[in-house]
Amino acid sequence: MAPEGGLLIDLSRSPDGLGDARITSHRALGLARAFVGKRVDDAVKTVPLLFNICGMAQGSAVAEAAEHALGEQAIGKVAPGERAFDAMRRVNARRVRHLLVQAEIAREHMISMVRDTAHHLDTEASETATLRILKCYKALASAIDPRRDAFTIGASLSPDQGALEAAADALATTIEDLVLAEPILRFEARQSEASFMAWLRAGRSHAQCLASLIVERGWSPEGDVATDFLPSLAETELARSLAGDAADLFARQPTWLGAPKETGPLSRQHDAPLVQALTAAYGRGLLTRFAARLVELARLPARLRATAGTSELSIRAASPALGHGIAQVEASRGRLIHSIEVVGDLVKSYAIVAPTEWNFHPAGSGRRSLARIAARPRDVEEVAGLFVASLDPCVAYDVRVR
């Protein structure tokens, strides 16, 4: 187990063939409480630096939550005479933060497809490919937030549109070269099981080879169980779960309407034609989950180019009560929630609900999927590892088969 904590996943199979899974979290979830009593600005500046994997999502969430908690105080941080433009300022800031999150999702999905698939195929990940992904991400981030002040409360933000177009084009080429091994438009036209099978049989990329391995070994439906996706949540409803002593329990083991939910690429892409076709054939098992991430990755260059409008933004935020701001961000691994209450410019309470706590809830669909996998007579550790990777926890994890 990594020193900062993580997940311990124990799988077992009884003599009568029934599988069981136990998920124990050793995650350090008290980070948000460390900011109570501190200045809001300090939290906004510091939080993105504490998360290597999802810093853009975390930074966007804390900035949006803080701005809505501060309300008029945040507006007051702009230059005199500019308050008439505050609504547009906030729209532009949210759009820039959205774009940073999309760039981060692209980086994380590509790294997973190059590095993690190499691990499961027992080959070496290409250092050249990894460096190309990181270079592509750096160009995107620089174009989206040229002054690097996206996480400054009340900042006036705008991307370098010309540089963003060029970086989005480079991202598309990188995805095509390293993951899809064909043009994005051709992959997006693959909307049936047969067409997807033709794609994976080409075997030119690690992603194709791993998908082919899953199919050849009969693992496509592994982990399929009834799954409840996390729905759209109104901030006024969330506020009740994130108030007072209830916030700590909700952050550790969140439920909605009395039940755990799942969030992530499959919940976001479940209505895509290819994902629907594979769900009809294999349920919500390994192959469908793998394809959902591919579909999302293929769509990201277009999302980065579509900078007009706010209806499709990955961020929403509101103030359910005076001095309280809640932000929800669709990050690479799923929905991230930040809740901040302030008194003056000091943090009164702060809670973070990460996607890992939804997806690896001890009574959630992830656990039930792993219990089904544990009932397999063979290949349990390998299949379970692939399934956990498909949910992609943001911390270290150990899978133990007993």
Image (cartoon, rainbow, N blue to C red):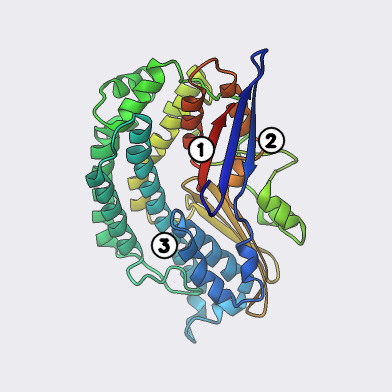
Which circle's residue, 2 or 1, is located before the other in the chain? 2
Which circle's residue, 1 or 3, is located before the other in the chain? 3
Q: Residue placed at 30% from the left, 53% from the top?
A: 134
The image's mark for residue 363 is 2
Q: Residue type at mark 2: give it.
A: Ala
Q: Which residue is mark 3?
A: 96
The residues bearing labels 2 and 1 have C-alpha atoms spaced at a distance of 15 Å
Q: Quadrant of the C terminus?
A: top right
Eyeballing the image, is 110 above or below 92? above
Q: Which residue is mark 1?
A: 391
- Residue situated in front as seen by the camera: 50 or 110: 50
Q: Residues within 10 Å of mark 3 (few under 14, many from 20)?
A: many
Q: Secondary structure at mark 3?
A: helix
Of labels 1 and 3, the one closer to you:
1
- Residue situated in front as seen by the camera: 333 or 303: 333
Q: Residue type at mark 1: give it.
A: Leu
Task: Give the left or right position of residue 29, taking residue 119 as reference.
Answer: right
Q: Residue placed at 39% from the left, 43% from the top?
A: 109
- Residue situated in front as seen by the camera: 74 or 87: 74
Eyeballing the image, is 275 above or below 106? above
Q: Residues within 10 Å of mark 2 (few under 14, many from 20)?
A: some
Q: Looking at the picture, how far across and down is residue 155, in whole percent?
A: 45, 74
